Amino acid sequence: MSTLISVDTCDFNYLLKVTESTKGNLSIQLKKLGQEKYINVKKCFENNYPKTRYKITSKGVKLFEQFFKDIQTIKEN
Amino acid sequence: MESKKQIEIINQMINKTKEQLRPFSLNLIFWGVLISIMSIIYFNVLHLFEADIYHILFWSIIPLLGSGFMTNYNIKAGRKIGYETHLSRTIKIIWITFGIAWIFIILLSVFHGFVGTIIQFLILFTSAICLIISGILIKYLPVTLGGGSILVILTLSAIFPEISYVLVNLLSLTLGFTVPGLFLYFHKSND
């Protein structure tokens, strides 16, 4: 979510690189975020290869901001 | 997990996304060099043709081909990078708007018979504004100054109308596009 909030859109391979996660783990996390409408998932083909692009939704931004405020409050206390 | 550790992870993730300015710098260099070469060719050969249609075709077909080439390059570069930041999206929108304005100016010149100097003024003025905005957005002074230098050259060409508008084109494109593009390419591409 931190990566998605700092970009407009990004693809699966980029998320895989920055999160240093496994394909399976990352795809499950992204699927859950997509189901909750925190991110938009767009599947397309580029040069006959499937490509998935992700974009954070306004609902996702609000949730992330709230999460960030909460952990800052916890840290301050 | 501790809240401090969580904030650290969020910071690390955000910092991993770097602004990729190399494609933008290559766009500036490409357009600066292309239009400068076109100006030299025009100055030496094409101005001999009297019919306006040759001039309009020269100044519209080659830039259109250039636009096609650079659009293809930008799409491929975007795919290779794998992400698009909010800033690069904003800059993309600014230059797409410039492209639309350019088409609009060319069409107006065809239908209303604008003379070369007016078309040139409108296109250079619009490009200068786009450069200034882009420079401010990416916080890179040479690009902003490049846009400013085009405005200065346009002002000088209005005060001294005897200055050849091919020379105005050459100077504007070199100072406004090629030089800031090279600065950006060598100094900020990997920031």
Image: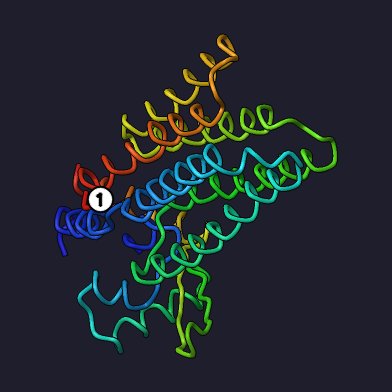
Q: Quadrant of the N terminus of chain B?
A: bottom left
- x, y (%) of residue B89? 48, 52
Q: In this view, does A68 lie to the left or right of B9?
A: right
| Viewer-side residue, B52 vs B49 | B49
Where A48 falls versus B190 (above or below)?
below
Q: Can residue A77 be seen in this view?
A: no
Is residue B141 left or right of B122 when viewed as pictured?
Answer: left
Residue A67 placement (x, y as % from top left): 35, 56
In this figure, which residue is indicated by the disc labeled 1? B189
Helix, strand or loop for disc 1: loop
Where in the figure is residue B150, as x and y percent of width and height?
Answer: 47, 26
Please tell me which residue lies in front, B183 or B159: B159
By what rule are the colours in the image chosen?
rainbow
Describe residue B142's horizontal placement relative to residue A58 as left or right.
left
**What residue do we see at 44% from left, 74% from top?**
A33
Q: Nearer the viewer, residue B173 or B92?
A: B173
> Which quarter of the figure has residue B83?
bottom left
Label 1: how many Cα within 10 Å (few below 14, some 14–19, many 20+): some
Which residue type carries mark 1? Answer: Ser
The residue at the point 53 percent across, 82 percent down is: A44
Q: Which residue is drawn at 59% across and 43% down?
A: B98
Residue at (81, 35) in percent of width and height = B113
Please provide percent x and percent y for residue A37: 53, 70
From this view, report whether residue A22 is shown above or below residue B115: below
Residue A25 appears in the figure: yes
| Disc 1 chain ID | B
On the rendered structure, is B68 left or right of B134?
A: right
Task: Please give the count of numbered marks on the rendered protein.
Answer: 1
Toward the top, the furthest residue is B159
